[in-house]
Every structure is written in C-alpha cells, then in structure tokens.
Amino acid sequence: MPLPIVQFNYLGALHSPFSGGLIQPVDDACNEEEPTLLFAYDANVGEWGYISARVTDNLPESLPEDAETLEDLDATEVAELLDIPGAIVMAVDYDWNGIIYFGVAPVESTDEDA
C-alpha cells in the first residue's frame, strides 16, 4: 500500500511524529541520525538529501521503466513503491525554500524487543 502524504506549511524545526527527535533543523541539512527518518527530498531542486537503507531494502525488485536508479524518482513516486507499516510522507512547504518531502516511520522492532 502506498505511503500516505500529509501536506502542510511550517517554518520551524521539524520533529518526527514517532520519536519526537529532530528531523530538520531550521536552515540546515536533515538529521541522518534520526532512526525514524526514511528519506528527505527537496522538490524545489529535485534532489535527494538523504535515503536510508530501510528505503532501499523495502523497494520492489524492479523500478518503473523510466527509472534506472532510485535517484531517478521523486518522493511521491517512491512513496507509491514503498510498503512500510505505519510510515507516512510529510510534504512540508517551507515557504521561501519550497517543499521538502520527509518519509518517516516507526522504528523497526527486533525479536529482542518482543
């Protein structure tokens, strides 16, 4: 099932709805250490800022015909390909900086967590 996309305008630092951890500080790159962050995509320039291993591990074996690599896709196309339980995509309109897409998901549990 494609990941749902939630769109909103916001100018402050962005935190994960799953952990409360900082995802995007104001005027800085995304926080790649945040375990709930799946990806960051800057739609204004069409560039990926971050793609986690969790995204690449959950992609289908074949990408759409017009894409040779994941970087050939945009955030909405990736959201359609992923099936990560509980994950969402936040399309944040930062006004002067354009829209940045952040994929976030609950932290994966391990057998040790059970």
Image (cartoon, rainbow, N blue to C red):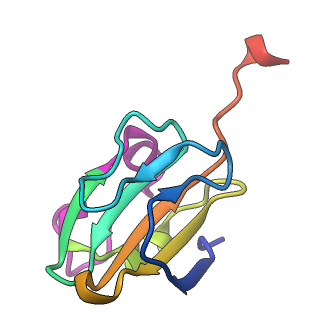
In this view of the protein, which residue sits in the foreground, 113 or 94?
A: 94
* Residue 11 x %, y %: 42, 76
Q: Residue at x 24, y 81 (%)?
A: 97
Residue 3 is left or right of residue 112, and the answer is left
Say which of 42 and 62 sits in front: 42
The answer to whether residue 83 is visible is: yes
Q: Is residue 14 above or below residue 42?
A: above
Q: Name the residue at 20% across, 81% down.
A: 66
Q: Against 57, is 73 above or below?
A: below
Is 87 placed above or below 101 here? above
Q: Is residue 52 magenta?
A: yes
Front residue of this view, candidates 47 and 57: 47
Q: Is residue 47 left or right of residue 87?
A: left
Q: Is residue 51 left or right of residue 76?
A: left
Is 22 a magenta residue? no
Residue 26, position in %: x, y?
33, 60
Span highlighted in magenta in the image: 51-71
**Residue most toward the top?**
112
Residue 32: x percent and y percent?
34, 40
The N terminus, quarter of image: bottom right
Residue 58, horizontal then vertical, whole percent: 49, 49
